[in-house]
Amino acid sequence: MLGEKFDEALKLASDLHREQTRKKTPIPYLAHLMAVAGIVLEANAYHQFDNIEDIAIAALLHDAIEDQGHKIPCCRILRL
């Protein structure tokens, strides 16, 4: 179900959002991204998406461009 592409996306999300916290809290922003990916993965148990890995990756990276786009090397996105 989840493979190396997901691992790379999780690492990228972690690298990009490492210093970021949820607004006005000490909660690491990565917790939000992982929670959204978790919701997607759990929903797959009931809806059986054909491309669940890609959807979970989108959940992990849904704020990457908006929040940290200036830090993303183009080649890193293209590999995902």
Image: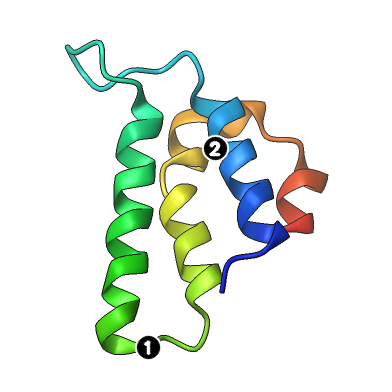
Position of 73 relative to 4 (above/below): above
Q: Amino acid at mark 2?
A: Ala
- Scheme by which the image is coloured: rainbow
Residue name at image x 46 percent, y 49 percent: 60
The span from disc 2 to disc 1 (Cα, nearest Å) is 25 Å
Q: Which residue is mark 2?
A: 13
Residue name at image x 68 percent, y 48 percent: 8
Residue 48 circle label: 1
Count every numbered label the image shows and give the total. Answer: 2
Judged left or right of residue 47, residue 67 is right
Q: Amino acid at mark 1?
A: Gln
Judged left or right of residue 27, residue 6 is right
Mark 1 Cα-neighbour bin, 10 Å: few <14, some 14–19, many ≥20: few
* Furthest residue in direction right, as rendered: 75
Contact between marks 2 and 1 (CB within 8 A): the answer is no
Pinpoint residue 11: horizontal percent, then vertical percent: 63, 38
Pinpoint residue 58: horizontal percent, then vertical percent: 48, 59
